[in-house]
Image (cartoon, helix red, strand yellow):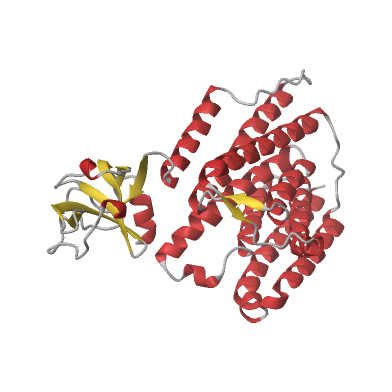
Amino acid sequence: MNKIGNKKRIISLSIIIYLFLYVIFYLFILVNKYLKYAGPISAAMLIGLCALTVALLGFRKDQINYIKKTIFKIIVIELLFYFCLIYALGLTFGFLKNAYSLNPLMIFNNMFIPFIVVITSEIMRYVIISNNKEDKLSKLIMVLLTMALIVLDISFSIRIDMFNSPIKIFKVLTTILLPSVAKNMMLSYLTYHVGIRQSLLYRLIMDLYIYIVPIFPDLGEYASSMLGILLPYMVYRYTSREIREYKVGPEYTYNFKLFNGSDLALLGLTVVLICLVSGFFPLYILGIASGSMSPEIGIGDAVLVKKVNLDSDISKGDVIVYEHNDLNIVHRVIIKEIGTDGKITYRTKGDANNSEDKIDLNIEDIKGKVLVKIPFIGYPSIWFSN
């Protein structure tokens, strides 16, 4: 039995290593030299590797029982709520038209390779995890497998030129890597405790719906990434409760509650943060990446900004926000005067700058007035940039 376990362990680790090596080959060779064939080659490779995994380790039948059906229901409810939430937010923030063609043939062509990636990835996840559950190194194997599948997952969304500046690296980390980490950790947890059907359901819906819906909520990359982290966490939160209850006693009457108090608080906080970052409220939060307002407002601080519409809202000495060359500038009003045309104009200056800004501003140019500084909360992004 020990020899069989060692053999399965070696096969599993070999497959995991191969996945890591293939991602390197994909990013540095296929994408750079054979981009036209990168998708089909990846699909063929994954099909072959998946078939080899099943042939060497075997496929344990995923038995249906009470807990599996319960987890299935939870995932369906969570996904329905997620789509209701983001499209409700879309009614406020607007929608974007799907860039993919919705012609049936084009939908098939666009979905084919992602479909292969989802199916083969989840089969390999299930086969490797189910064949190493009793192994002493099962947790290590599951961690390494999850890392390999994260790397494989994000490899289809990144390019090497995305890492040529600190800002681009930070963007990849926050909008691509972190949501993928949250998703794959949750999927490995479900696969280990429940089986393959639930993971497949989640992946097929979340990875493929983008090819068939006509419009998307325009929430912005960072708000979308927050939701991309929150959804796997909520799925894990509810499914883990059911799994723990199932394992400590006999099957019980299904009594799933969509939300409890702490969940509502977390959801409410997330929605508020999205609205604050997106600028929906009269108040919004803005991070500071420049030292031009030091020492009052430093690099890494954030400011709470109130939108303004009237000249009477702004006085000399106020710190305001205006946009110039696609950048948000946070400077102090040093001059407020009435021009020859009767309109009030403003001149600004950074507290740490030697000269004033050479821009005459009108009330229409001003995006808001700073109410209060929130120290330190912007430091993580500054550390990544540095």
Looking at the image, which is closer to me, 51 or 130?
51
Which residue is found at the position 55% from the left and 55% from the top?
A: 177
Looking at the image, which is closer to me, 45 or 107?
107
Q: Position of residue 227 (x, y in %)?
A: 55, 44
Looking at the image, which is closer to me, 161 or 60?
161
Q: Choose top left, top right, bottom left or bottom right for residue 83.
A: top right
**Residue 99 to residue 206: above or below:** below
Query: In the image, 168: left or right of 46?
Result: left
Query: In the image, 355: left or right of 270?
Result: left
Q: Choose top left, top right, bottom left or bottom right for residue 371.
A: top left
The outermost residue toward the front is: 341
The answer to whether residue 323 of the structure is visible from this angle is yes
Q: Choose top left, top right, bottom left or bottom right for residue 384.
A: bottom left
Looking at the image, which is closer to me, 311 or 51?
311
Which residue is found at the position 52% from the left and 54% from the top?
A: 175
Query: In the image, 59: left or right of 261?
Result: right
Q: Position of residue 76 (x, y in %)?
A: 73, 36
Give the position of the C terminus as an image quadrant.
bottom left
The outermost residue toward the top is: 253
Q: Position of residue 313 (x, y in %)?
A: 23, 41
How many callouts does the rendering have? 0
Which residue is found at the position 21% from the left and 44% from the top?
A: 314
Query: In the image, 334: left or right of 367?
Result: left
The answer to whether residue 129 of the structure is visible from this angle is no
Q: Position of residue 29 (x, y in %)?
A: 63, 78
